[in-house]
Image (spheres, grey):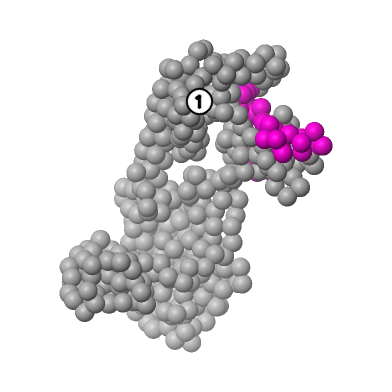
Amino acid sequence: MFEGKVPPESGPFRVQYLEANGLANLDQARLWLDEVLGGLPPVPVELVENGSADRARALTGPEAHERWSTIRRDMPAEVLETIADQLEGAVTSAVAAFNFLEDHPLREEAHKVVHRTAAVRGGLLGCKIGLKGESLESECPVDLSHLRWGFSPGIVADFVCNICSSPIEDCDHIAGTTYVAVAGRFGKVCSLCHSATCDHVEGEVYSIEAVSYATAIRSEEVSVVERPLYPLARAAAFTLPRPPSQVELVAVETGTLECNACLGPCRGMKTFAEWQAGSGDDEAS
Amino acid sequence: MSDAAKTTDWTPDGAALPSGPQEGRIYLLPTRSLADGQPAYVERQRTWPKEARSDGLPLEFAMESGNRQFLSEYSSGPEFWEVALAFVGPITDVILLAVQMILLKAGRDVGHSDAESLAHPVKVSIAELTFDGSALRGVAVEGTGDEVLSTIKGIIKAAKK
């Protein structure tokens, strides 16, 4: 995994990065889902493709809700509490897997795992819709993961060398090479490791690897792109494109307004343009 | 190997040119601009001159330290690599070596083999400057790395006649 570093932007390194992270998340999602399902009676977690209105009604209609309610009612509270953490983790991992594996042969498998984990989560825990200002706001993982766009910030920064404190483009130190350097101080942080709490003593000599540290970081703009460098740099919530009804407002107050998107069926992916145009149905219930 | 790169006339942004350029040096020009119009380098270019120096190539930034800005854009890509260079005096084989070094470096940074790097789409823009820093003439060459290098080789050969 490339945790902590800027992901490679293209080429074989990016392919490796996406696959490693995608497979790890996919495995984790499947593992947790299997553990949860192992302790439950049969639940409706089929993935229904577009166009099947009858199947959609079967998955989201009153009978399906009653099945989920029965399962929840019969489950001890402590079991539900344990399952809740696993389910949230499974959904998060499944969505992450889908974002990492977007251009991989396992894309569709990751897509199905998103639906399966989110359906179980939606059925057992509910997928609450809240109020933000005067609009209804959803954090539905199915809806969000089907918005196939993310964020790309444009950032300008200076980078200084930890060995000589010069701009890294001007000095002769090569990143990754070990040099002998004298520890100094930049305000409260160490010049060698940029930590405020390290063991380096100012004025002492250390053998240390050359790295660069960003300073004077400035955000120029944020763009919406199809493939963000960080695959998980995506929308975390969205507002519904219509004012809430009085019934919905009451339901929000009582915490009973839920979305049905996670229960199925799959309604397809949306590009940024399609999402902006407001295509598709909202699913507050 | 085909040398069918596309060549077009090119005029660099005057604000990106070095002041007081010296013969025998190759200047790396910024290829982007910020929202306020200021020229900016792409982040991945930050260490190119330093690495060129370690290879004995006289590559340096056109913009002086303190005036340089490096832009990082966090989207996956780009589809092709872009390089802009400037120099004073006749075009020589050193330019070719610098372009080759840059292409191979750009490829290695993302995990490509040298052969893959030279097959990758690239746009190389080269400007010949006068001693007062204005552009005399420029050309943009677009194609695979191999095609571009072959075309630049042809330009150098023609200049020697």
Q: Is residue B34 above or below residue A61?
A: below
Residue A263, picture quadrant: top right
Q: Is residue A73 above or below residue A182?
A: above
Q: Position of residue A73 (x, y in %)?
A: 57, 19
Residue A71, picture quadrant: top right
Tell which of B60 and B148 is nearer to you. B60
Q: Chain of mark 1?
A: A
Q: Position of residue B136 (x, y in %)?
A: 51, 78
Q: Please report the bounds of the magenta region as a residue range.
A: A245-274
Q: Is residue A16 magenta?
A: no
Residue at (36% x, 47% y) in the render: A2
Q: Residues within 10 Å of mark 1 (few under 14, many from 20)?
A: few
Residue at (41% x, 22% y) in the render: A35
Q: How many marks?
A: 1
Badge 1 amino acid: Ala
Tell which of A209 and A205 is nearer to you. A205
Q: Secondary structure at mark 1?
A: helix
Answer yes or no: is residue A91 visible: yes
Answer yes or no: is residue A108 visible: no
Q: Is residue A271 magenta?
A: yes
Q: Position of residue B46 (x, y in %)?
A: 39, 67
Tell which of A51 and A35 is nearer to you. A35
Residue at (67% x, 13% y) in the render: A63
Q: Is residue A29 above or below residue A169?
A: above
Q: Quadrant of the N terminus of chain A?
A: top left
Q: Position of residue A140 (x, y in %)?
A: 61, 35
The residue indicated by pointer 1 is A77
